[in-house]
Image: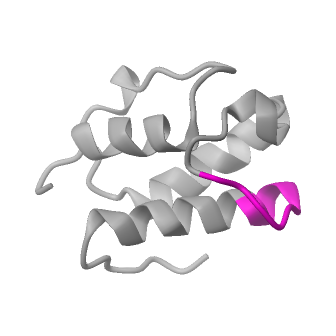
Amino acid sequence: MTECVYENIDEMLEQLISETKEILNKEDIFPDSTLTEIGIDSLNVIELIVACEQIYTKVTRPEELQFDEFTTIQDLHSQLIELSSDW
């Protein structure tokens, strides 16, 4: 994935969904899907974190990110926006 500049946070969510689909080789993932529902495992979490680092480049407090098997893609996105500077 190449680093992109996003015009708004909706584009970032769409990119997160796109990257998650690619990681899991799935056609449909929705923002309200939980990590368990979409089949994220411990290896996929690492890939997802790398994708998030590339999409959400202005995260200033990544250690405050909290997620578990019940976290949705939208929850993850919202936390990353909240932890970012300039949004």
Foreground: 42 or 78? 78
Left or right: residue 3 versus residue 45 is left
Query: Which quadrant of the structure image shows residue 1?
Result: bottom right
Q: Is residue 53 left or right of residue 34?
A: left
Instruction: Give above or below for 60 relative to 68.
Output: below
The residue shown at (26%, 54%) is: 58
> Residue at image x 77%, y 62%?
28
Q: Position of residue 34 (x, y in %)?
A: 66, 33
Is most of the magenta stretch helix, strand or loop?
Answer: loop
Q: Quadrant of the C terminus?
A: bottom left
Apparent side of residue 35 relative to residue 27 in the rendered image (left or right): left
Among all residues in the image, which is located at the extreme left?
A: 86
Residue 27, compared with residue 75, is above or below; it is below
Residue 47: % across, % down? 71, 49
User: For this rendering, which residue is in front, 31 or 8?
Assistant: 31
Q: Position of residue 32 (x, y in %)?
A: 57, 41
Spot occupied by residue 33 in the image (x, y as percentages of width and height): 66, 40
Q: How many marks?
A: 0
Region rendered in magenta: 21-30
From what the image shows, is residue 17 above or below residue 41? below
- Residue 3 magenta-highlighted: no
Residue at the spot x=78%, y=66% of the render? 22
Q: Nearer the viewer, residue 31 or 45?
A: 31
41 sits to left or right of 82 = right
